[in-house]
Image: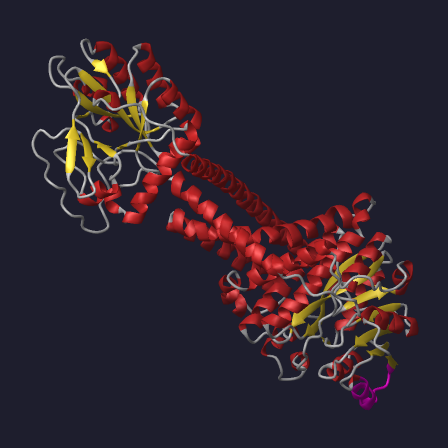
Amino acid sequence: MARHASRRAPRAHWLLLLLAMGVLLAELCLDGWVDGVSGEQGPAPAAAAPQAAAPALPDGTGPVLQVAADGSVRSAAMPAGAVALTFDDGPDPKWTPLILDALRRHHARATFFVVGARVNQHPDLVRRIVAEGHELGVHTFTHADLAAVPAWRQRLELDLTRNAIAAATGRTVRLLRPPYSSTPSAPPGPAVLRAATGYLTVLTDRDTEDWRRPGVDAIVAAALPAPAGPGAVVMLHDGGGDRAQTVAAVERIVSQGAGLRFVTVSEGIGLPPEVAAGTGTVVRGHALRWAQVAADWISAAMWWLIVAGTVLALLRLVVQVVTARRHARRAAVAARRPLRSFGLVSVVVPAYNESANIAATVRSLIGNDYPQIEVIVVDDGSTDGTAEVVRRLGLPGVRLIRQANAGKPAALNTGIAAARGQLLVLVDGDTVFEPDAVGRLVQPFADPSVGAVSGNTKVANRGGLLGRWQHLEYVVGFNLDRRMFELGECMPTIPGAIGAFRRAALLDVDGVPSDTLAEDTDLTMAVLRAGWRAVYAERAVAWTEAPASLRQLWRQRYRWCYGTMQAAWKHRRALRERGHLGRRGLVYLAVFQMLLPLTAPLVDVYAVYSLFFLPVGQVAAVWCGFTLLQVLVAAYALRLDRERFGPLWTVPLQQVVYRQLLYLVVVQSTVAALLGSRQRWQVMARTGLAATAVAPGGSADRASVHNRPGRP
C-alpha cells in the first residue's frame, strides 16, 4: 500500500546459494567418505554381488605380482636372507612414529602401504617415512575392498591415493596392496588384478594377522623366517586399531633377526629408486588434500552450528513455554475483572482496494459491544470501489475520508488526525473483529504506563494445508512470542491487523512512520523507545484473511521480513539506550528471525548428508524427537488460545515445505537489504473469507473462540 521506489528484486544470489549448497554437500560427503576410514579388523566384508573366482597361480609364485594388459601375471620374491617388513592401514599418528623409531634404532627399512585419506591427514608423517629411507605403497584411499566396488571406484581409490602421496612427498608410487589381500595361494580376484595394471601388486609370504592381537610372541613367530631359508614379505599393520602388540613385536623382530636383512620391497627385488611425480599429479594431490582439510573444518563447523542452533532452539522453547504459562495466569486474573469504559475509542481503518472485506470489517467494528466507538475509514485512492462500499453502508458512527494514494502510513496519520478519541485502534481493511474485541483490547490502558496493546490475530481461511500452517504459525510463533515479549517488556510489533495506541504515545513519536515497509514494527519500536510499555491482550480477537497461495505468502513475508530488518536497523541505537527493546527485543529478532534462518539452508544440507553417512535410526530418532517436541509445544499454544488440536497433524509436513519458504524469504530479504534495494507493497487479492469467521454458522473453528471455557 505504501509507495516506495523499487528496484527489481535481486536474483543472481539464488544461483550462488544453490552452488554454495552443492559445494557444501560435496565437502560434507567427502568428509563422510573419508571419516569412516578404518583398517583391517577382520575378514573382507561380503561383496554385494557375486565375484568371479580368483585365478589359480602356479606353485612357487612370488608375492610381488605384475599384471600385464593381456592379463598375464609375472611374479617376484624376496631373495634368501631378505625380509621386507610391510605395514598396512597407516599412517597413524600414534603407532607409526613408534614403529619408525624401532626401525631406526636397528637400521632396518620397511614398506608402508598407506591409506590415501590418512596421507592427507598426516603428510608430515608420510614425509618422515620417506626421509628415513622407507618405501611407500598404495592401500586405496578409504581402505575399500576393491573386489566389492565397481571399476570407476577402483580407479578413483588408486588415483586419489597416488595423488595424495605425490603431494606429500613429491614422488610417484608403483606398489599396491589391495586391502584384505593375503598370500599368493589366495590371490585377489580378476577385477582387482585388472585394476592393478600399472602397479606391482604386493601380497605376502607371512601374514602375522596382528590385527587379531594374538600376542607379541605369536606375531614374532609368524613374522620371522628361518635365517637360512628363503626371504619373505611380512604383513603387519601400523594403523586401523590398537597396534601396541605390533609395536612391541617389531622391536623384537628387528633385534632378533640375526642374519636377516630388513629391506624395502623394491630393494629386495632389485628395482631402482622411484622417480619424481609429475607436476599435474602433485597439483591434483594438493587440491585433494586442501579439499579434504576444508571438508574436515566444514564438518566440524557444521557440527557446532547444529549444536548451537539446537541449544538456542531448546532454550527458546523453554522460555516461551514458561513465560506463556505466567502470562496466561495473569490474563486469566484480568479476564475476571469487569470491563471498564475509557470514553470514546477511535478506530482508524486505512483501506486500499479492500472492497471484498471492508463491509464486514466496518460492520464488525460498529457491532462491537464497547459503548463509545467511532470508525474512520481512510480510502487511500482505491480503484475497486472500496469507498462506495463504505458509503452505501450508511452506518452511524462511521466517517469516510478519501485521499489520493499516498501509502498506508499516510492514510493512518490522516485518520489519527481526524480522530476524536484519546485511545486509537488501528485496523487493517481486511480484519474482522469479534464482538467484544475493542472492549478487551483497551482494558490494559488502565495502566498509565501502557502506550500500545496488541490484539490476538487469527487466520480465517485455515481450511487447506497452507491455511493450517499459517494458523499454527500465528498461534505458536506469533502469540507465544507476544506473551514472552510482554513479560520481557520488549514487544517489537503491534500488528497492523489489531492494535491500539494511546494518543499521547503517538504524539511522542510523531505519528506513524513511513520510511520502512513494516510501519507497525517501526511504530512499536519508536513507542517503546519513547518510554511506553506495549502489552498483549490475548482475548481481544480479530480475524484476518491469510495468503491463499505460496506466491502471495512469499510476497507478504518478504515485505514483513524486509521491513523488520529496516526497522531493526533504524532503531539500532536502542542497544545502547535504557529499556529492554535493544538488549532483549532487537537481539531476539537478530538471532531467531535473521541469523538462525540464514543458517537453515546449511542445516538442510547437513540433514541430506546425514541420510547417507549417519546411522538412519539415529537420524530418524533425532528428527522424530524434535518433531514431537514441536507438536507438544504447538498443542500447548493451541490450548492457551482455546483452539482445537486438529491442525497438529500438519506439523511434520510444515518442516518440509513451509519452513523452507520462510527461511528463503529471510535470505532474499537479507540480500536485498545488503544491496540497498527499495521494495514496494504487494497487494494481496482478497476474497472476503475473513467475514465468514464471525458470521453465524461461518467458520467451523469459530466455536473455539466463542464457546471457550471460562469466558466471562
In the rendered view, how is the structure colored? secondary structure
Q: Position of residue 520 (x, y in %)?
A: 78, 63
Q: Quadrant of the C terminus?
A: bottom right
Q: Quadrant of the N terminus?
A: bottom right
Q: Is residue 306 left or right of residue 113?
A: right
What residue do we see at 81% from left, 71% from top? 408
Q: Is residue 289 above or below residue 323?
A: above
Q: Position of residue 571 (x, y in %)?
A: 80, 52
Q: Is residue 492 left or right of residue 109?
A: right
Corner quadrant of residue 34: top left
37 within the magenta span: no
Q: Is residue 622 left or right of residue 472?
A: left
In depth, the one of 433 and 522 nearer the eye is 522
Q: Is residue 193 above or below residue 385?
A: above
Q: Position of residue 120 (x, y in %)?
A: 42, 33
Q: Residue furthest left?
A: 59
In depth, the one of 341 and 87 nearer the eye is 87
What residue do we see at 58% from left, 55% from top? 16
Number of marks in picture? 0
User: What span is in magenta?
Assistant: 387-400
399 within the magenta span: yes
In depth, the one of 386 and 468 nearer the eye is 386
In depth, the one of 563 and 126 nearer the eye is 126
Look at the image and tell me whether residue 210 can be seen. yes
Q: Is residue 465 above or below residue 316?
A: below
